[in-house]
Amino acid sequence: MPEVDALRVGVAVGIPEPWGGMLDEARAAAGDPMAEFIPSHVTLLGPTDVPSPALPLIEDHLSNVAPLFSPFPVQLRGTGTFRPLTQVVFVAVAAGISEFEQLAAAVRAGPLQRELHFPYHPHVTVAHDISTEALDKVFEELADFSARFPVDHFTLYVHGADGRWRPVRDFALGVP
């Protein structure tokens, strides 16, 4: 039996401009090699391998999830880290945590159900697996970062062969 083609998908809330660009630039300046491939975002579903034919089922699932949630305000403020567990520095979600947690749980149901390796913690990664000095520097440089914006949709992404995450479709919150 031939193997079914697989896709790597992810679901996230992108960080709007001007803040998304600022965080992308900070990640690139820190020397994170993934900066050019992954736009700033809050993950709802991390990279997940699925059979290619499942994409319509996944889109249907996400179409059913989005209307169950109303748009919500988010505040990003300051930095945090997962060190020493993982070499990550992030911008913290200060408001909207509960909404992200509930939305992520609903996204990770049905055809996207998966076991998490760590408890879900909404955040915006700004540096990953770079030198300790570079992690410390971006942690300090973004310590006073603050942004407020509404979240009114989330996006399904597909990981391309070139390493880039490309948006496939947006799903509006609260819209049947």
Image (tube, grey):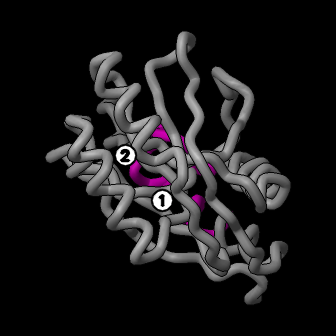
Q: Is residue 71 left or right of residue 124?
A: right
The reply to whether callout 2 and callout 1 are in contact (CB within 8 Å) is yes
Three-letter amino acid code of the residue under disc 2: Leu
Q: What's the residue at 52%, 56% (across, down)? A: 145
In the rendered image, residue 55, in percent from the top left (x then y), is placed at 48, 59
User: To which residue does mark 2 refer?
Assistant: 7
Distance of label 2 from label 1 (alpha carbons): 8 Å
From this view, report whether residue 160 is shown above or below residue 74: above
Residue 99 part of the magenta segment? no
Return the residue nearer the eye: 61 or 167: 167
Q: What's the residue at 51%, 76% (across, down)? A: 170
Secondary structure beneath disc 1?
helix
From this view, report whether residue 84 is shown above or below residue 56: above
In the rendered image, residue 129, in percent from the top left (x then y), is placed at 34, 22
Q: Say the numbered circle drawn on residue 66.
A: none
User: To which residue does mark 1 refer?
Assistant: 55
Image quadrant containing the C terminus: bottom right
Secondary structure beneath disc 2?
strand
Q: What's the residue at 44%, 49% (across, down)? A: 9
Q: Is residue 44 left or right of residue 129?
A: right
Q: What's the residue at 67%, 23% (across, down)? A: 118
